[in-house]
Image (tube, grey):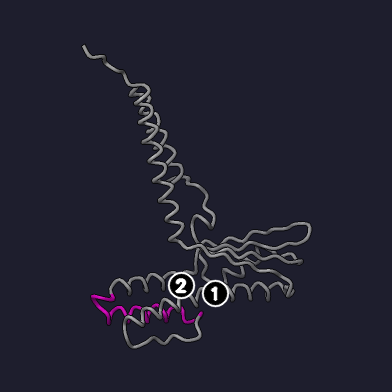
Amino acid sequence: YKLYMLLPIILFIVFAFLAFVYPTVPKGIDLQGGTLIVVRGDKPIDAVQLKQILEKEFDLADLKVNSVSSLNSSGVNVQFAASASILNASKQVDSAKAMLAANPTGAMQLAQTAVNSISGFLAGTELPSQPDKAVAQAELYLIEANKNLDERIQKTIIESFSLSETTAFQIKDVSPTLSASFWQTALNVSIMAAVFITIVIFIFFRKIIPTI
């Protein structure tokens, strides 16, 4: 029965490697996090041209643009992981939060650096003089920057292709934290499944030595 016990372990290792290492499971926005902008209207949009425009205007990581068409409408799906500048600013704000208690002055300076780096997406960059409030305000600026980024992308699409007012936009944001939690849960479930299968095989195939 030991050979039967090895089988689920070997299969688990193989499938885990294929799913999480190489070639991995293809990740959509729900799994990797990011933003999906769905554009629908009565006018065709060149996906290749739009991708070139967005790459030139914005620093979007993992940008994908796909054409979508139906009998009644046509459009594109624009998907990206994040703006590189906003993502970097978010990491700086997280670092500022972590060092707030030990080094409030340094935390405030880091928060200001983060806000300055995304000033192009903000109406203002002023922070309060208190370190804790400054870091909190920096977090609010990040939310504003992400919102303004989506609006600018939408405006760029409309102006680049002279779209009508009837063009519909739908924006979906998925947190990277949520997607990371999904993958961790999937890994935990896979490990538990392999353990339970091994236990079942042991119970059904073990040799029972009768007592004398």
Secondary structure category for the residue under label 1: helix
- Label 2 Cα neighbours within 10 Å, binned few <14 / some 14-19 / many ≥20: many
According to the picture, the residue beneath numbered tag 2 turns out to be 86
Q: Three-letter amino acid code at disc 1?
A: Leu
On the image, the x and y values in percent for residue 75 come to 70, 63
Q: Note whether 166 is above or below 6 in the view shown.
A: below
On the image, the x and y values in percent for residue 67 come to 68, 59
Q: Name the quadrant of the N terminus.
A: top left
In the picture as drawn, the residue positioned furthest to the front comes out as: 212
Answer with left or right where residue 102 lies relative to residue 190. Answer: left
Answer with left or right where residue 3 lies relative to residue 210. Answer: right
On the image, the x and y values in percent for residue 185 come to 42, 49
Task: Write the start and end of the magenta stretch as one range.
Answer: 100-121
Which sits earlier in the primary sequence, circle 1 or circle 2?
2
Residue 13 lies in quadrant: top left
Front residue of 24/7: it is: 7
According to the picture, the residue beneath numbered tag 1 turns out to be 149
Q: Name the quadrant of the C terminus.
A: top left
Front residue of 59/145: it is: 145
Q: Are marks 1 and 2 in contact (CB under 8 Å)?
A: yes
Q: CA distance from mark 1 to mark 2?
A: 9 Å
Query: Which residue is drawn at the image coordinates 49% and 60% (left, top)?
Result: 33
On the image, the x and y values in percent for residue 62 come to 52, 61
Q: Main secondary structure of the magenta part?
A: helix
Q: Note whether 22 is above or below 201 in the view shown.
A: below
Q: Three-letter amino acid code at disc 2?
A: Ile
Secondary structure category for the residue under label 2: helix
Residue 170 lies in quadrant: bottom right
Query: Which residue is drawn at the image coordinates 44% and 69% (left, top)?
Result: 87
